Amino acid sequence: MEDFEELKKRQIVHTAKAIFIEKGYFAASMKEIAEACGMAKGSIYKLFDSKEDLFTAVFEDCHRIMFEQARELDRVNAHVAPMERLRRKIEFLLQYTLENYFFMSEFRELPITANEKFIVAWKKKRATLLTWHRDCFYEVYGERIEEHVWDMAAIFRGLLREYIAYAVQKAIALPMSELAQFFVERMDAVANDLLLRRPKPVLNESNAYYNHINPVGPDVQQRTVHDFLHACDVMVQELPKPESVRAELREVIGLLQRELKQEKPNRTLLHVYTTFLDTVVELRPYVRQLRLMI
């Protein structure tokens, strides 16, 4: 049996959730939450050090409930056909996200994003949710989709984000069950196209998972630029140019790679190298993107 303090914490979290949703983060006060709980403000501070800590507790509780319900859904639907199981999962996710939209957003403009406890909870949520998205497609398509599963997850998250935003604005008249079926059919079309055409994956576990959870650091950025320059090198090898021209272009790409590995790359040299590559019409789209990356 839960002790009295734990019951009190659950009451505060439940009440705070409703007030945060109604008033927003800034307008909600610990005094108001305490009064709604029928207790003194000091009683809340005995359990939660600050409004940030209380908000974090509500955030964690909201996602704990979601993942618990998702696991129960998996158990209940264990013997349902894979596609229908996926549809039910997506319907659940759409409905839960819509009903708890305030706590399912990214909070990018709120000061809570600088709170260490919240950052830990936020990263844990994103990691768990991303893994769940990936597993949804593994369950339906199996190892066949492994090479492209992270692209599938990214496309799905994009659909989810955009359509939920429309639903929150009351711009979608469809019930979530029908929207979920729409998602399943669109994602199945994407999966079949990927399996048929086998394009080179855009995302892998490193840049999809790690960078989804953490800010992109210098090491990751350098590796991304290196991979991009390697793609440029491959492109040059296929250009309908004399061998001497291709060799010179590849040499410049090599010089770029070497310079970018320096602790402080010489900006003048980078400009010279990219300007030289920009003289080749076929490379101009690559050079434009490269300049944005470096």
Image (cartoon, rainbow, N blue to C red):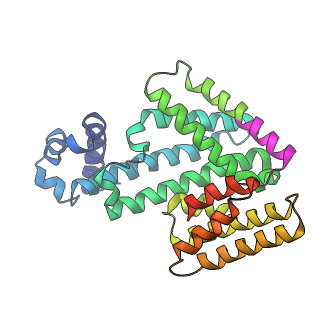
Magenta extent: 187-201
- Identify whether 210 is placed above or below 65: below
Q: Residue at x 61, y 36 (%)?
A: 90
Residue 111 quadrant: bottom left
Q: Residue at x 54, y 55 (%)?
A: 128
- Identify whether 293 is placed above or below 39: below
- Image-based side of 197 in relation to 93, left or right: right
Residue 192 highlighted magenta (yes or no): yes
The furthest residue to the bottom:
263
Q: Residue at x 77, y 55 (%)?
A: 146
Residue 79 in the image: state x and y as whole percent: 74, 40
Residue 253 in the image: state x and y as whole percent: 71, 71
Q: Residue at x 37, y 48 (%)?
A: 107
Residue 73 quadrant: top right
Q: From this viewpoint, is residue 80 visible?
A: no
Residue 19 in the image: state x and y as whole percent: 25, 38
- Image-based side of 289 in relation to 99, left or right: right
Q: Nearer the viewer, residue 71 or 267?
A: 267
